[in-house]
Image (cartoon, helix red, strand yellow):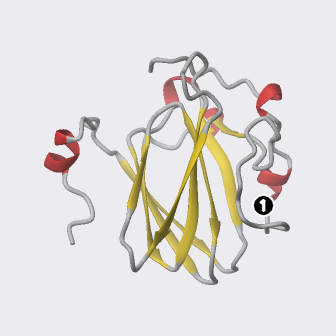
Amino acid sequence: MIPWDFLIMRELGISRPFVQDIQSYNTFKGTLRGLHFQNGEAAQAKLVRVLKGDVLDVAVDLRKGSPNYMEWVSVELTADNKKMLYIPRGFAHGFVTLCDDTEFLYKTDNAYCPEADRSIRFDDPQISVDWGIDNPILSEKDRKAPLLSESDCSFVYPM
């Protein structure tokens, strides 16, 4: 299997080049990361996949004015099914690990920018993502994330 091919992506209408690969390792089942995005000019599109283990991957449309504003999609990504998810600019991203020892890879079309890094609460009641878990393992960053209504998210549809 070819994990990523520029010509195939271009045929699908995805033509921005990816500039950075980021790999995440999570030790324990039930680890939840997200919902994350980069604000403003630092916004990122991502192509994500699992190298080892499996996750429930989530993308949330944060583009004000979008017909899908605050709607979310989820896909189970596993090392075995080799599925990938493309997350456009203007979306928040998160995942929860479904087993121990999970390795997650994502390509981004914009470099990591700490000043633009943002989070919203994984359990924001306006969005109501069904993570399939009651007590996730959260980082301090994710525990302290604001609700979308308290966020300075600046995405506007179309992007």
User: In the depicted view, which residue is nearer to us: 46 or 83?
Assistant: 83
User: Which residue position is annotated with label 1?
Assistant: 139
Q: Position of residue 59 (x, y in %)?
A: 56, 46
For this view, does 22 lie left or right of residue 118?
left
Disc 1 marks a residue whose amino acid type is Ser
User: In the depicted view, which residue is nearer to us: 32 or 128?
Assistant: 128
Q: Residues within 10 Å of mark 1 (few under 14, many from 20)?
A: few
Q: Position of residue 103 (x, y in %)?
A: 51, 74
Q: How many marks?
A: 1
For this view, does 30 lie left or right of residue 13?
right
Quadrant in the picture for the C terminus: top left
What secondary structure is marked by label 1? loop
Q: Position of residue 76 (x, y in %)?
A: 51, 66
Above or below, 40 against 24 in this view is above
- In this view, the residue farthest toward the left is 7
Q: Residue at x 62, y 81 (%)?
A: 99
Q: Residue at x 53, y 75 (%)?
A: 54
Above or below, 117 against 74 in this view is above
Q: Position of residue 74 (x, y in %)?
A: 56, 54
Quadrant in the picture for the N terminus: bottom left
Q: Residue at x 50, y 24 (%)?
A: 41
For this view, does 137 lie left or right of residue 40?
right
User: In the depicted view, which residue is nearer to us: 127 or 49?
Assistant: 127
- Which quarter of the picture shows residue 13? top left
Q: Residue at x 54, y 22 (%)?
A: 67
- Which quarter of the picture shows residue 156? top right
